Structure formats: structure tokens, C-alpha cells
Image (cartoon, grey):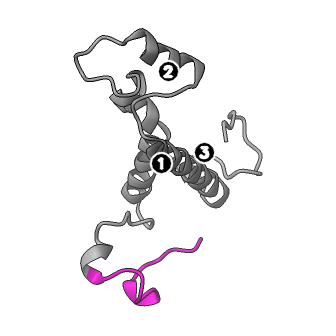
Amino acid sequence: MNVITQTSAFPDVFLDAEYHHLPDMTTFDGLLDLLSACTLAILGNALDPRTYSAPNQGEDEEMSDVQRLFMVKYDLNNIPSNERKAICYARGVAFYIFRWVRSEFNITGPDGHVKIYRHGSSSKYLRPF
């Protein structure tokens, strides 16, 4: 397992003042923080209320027939295309991180028994990723 434990390993990337914002991957809480951020990235589209609005539709406005056409026929919503692409990219990175965690870690419970096996090891659990 490769773990970054100090900023001197990447002096040009992280300043000490910025480093404390990163999850500490040597602790379970740090792993949960990382996986929580990934979950938010995966659900980003569903959690954004603009997903459910037509292009140029105000918060309290009814959807016009033209807006409905654009939304249904062209899969457009009130999120600009550059943001939609960024959301898709972030979702892909989040899934990559989930796969990386599955390949690098066995997660054990307080009793010491493995709860989530590394990808590729024998497991009685279904693996979604």
C-alpha cells in the first residue's frame, strides 16, 4: 500500500497549508472521507436540481413546450454542457478510485474479520465494481 505521509514527497504539488484538507489514507476515517467524496461525485447529477429543469427554466417557472422538446428530444437540461462533461469526468474518476480501493485494501471490522475483500481475492460478497 502506497501512502503519502508528508508533503515533502511532493514539494511542488501540496503546500503544508493545503495538505491538511486531503484525507489521511492511513486511517479508516480518511478512507471514509475519500469514499464519501467519491459517492457525492457519482451522485452529482442526481443531487443537482438543475438536472430536473429544462434549459433556461427559472426555479419557479413552468416548463414551456419548446423547453420540454429540448429536454426530451435532445437530452438537455439547465446544466451547461461544460459542467455536464466535468460531472461525467468526476464520476469516472470516482469509479476509478473505488476500484483502486477495492484492489489495494482489505477492510476489516472491529472483530478483525475481513468485511470487504480486495478485488481478485476469494469473497462471498457481490462486488459491484
For the image, the number of numbered tags is 3
Q: Type of residue at label 2?
A: Met
Mark 1 and mark 2: Cα distance apart in space: 17 Å
Closer to the eye: label 1 or 3: 1
Majority secondary structure in the magenta region: loop
Q: Type of residue at label 3?
A: Ile
Residue 66 position by quadrant: top left
Q: Residue at x 37, y 80 (%)?
A: 14
Q: Secondary structure at mark 2?
A: helix
Q: Secondary structure at mark 1?
A: helix
Nearer to me, 28 or 50: 50
Between discs 3 and 2, the one toward the N terminus? 2
Mark 3 and mark 2: Cα distance apart in space: 40 Å
Q: Secondary structure at mark 3?
A: strand
- Tell me: residue 92, above or below residue 53: below
Mark 3, Cα crowd under 10 Å, few <14 / some 14-19 / many 20+, is some
Check disc 3 and report the residue beneath it. Answer: 116
Please give the label number shown on residue 82.
Answer: 1
Horizontal and vertical percent for residue 102? 63, 52
Q: Type of residue at label 1?
A: Asn
Tell me the quarter of the image containing the C terminus.
top right
Magenta stretch contains residue 94: no
Horizontal and vertical percent for residue 47? 38, 31
Between discs 1 and 3, the one toward the N terminus? 1
The boundaries of the magenta stretch are 1-16
Q: Residue at x 41, y 42 (%)?
A: 40
Check disc 2 and report the residue beneath it. Answer: 71
Mark 1, Cα crowd under 10 Å, few <14 / some 14-19 / many 20+, is few
Mark 1 and mark 3: Cα distance apart in space: 36 Å
Nearer to me, 58 or 5: 58
Q: Residue at x 32, y 75 (%)?
A: 19
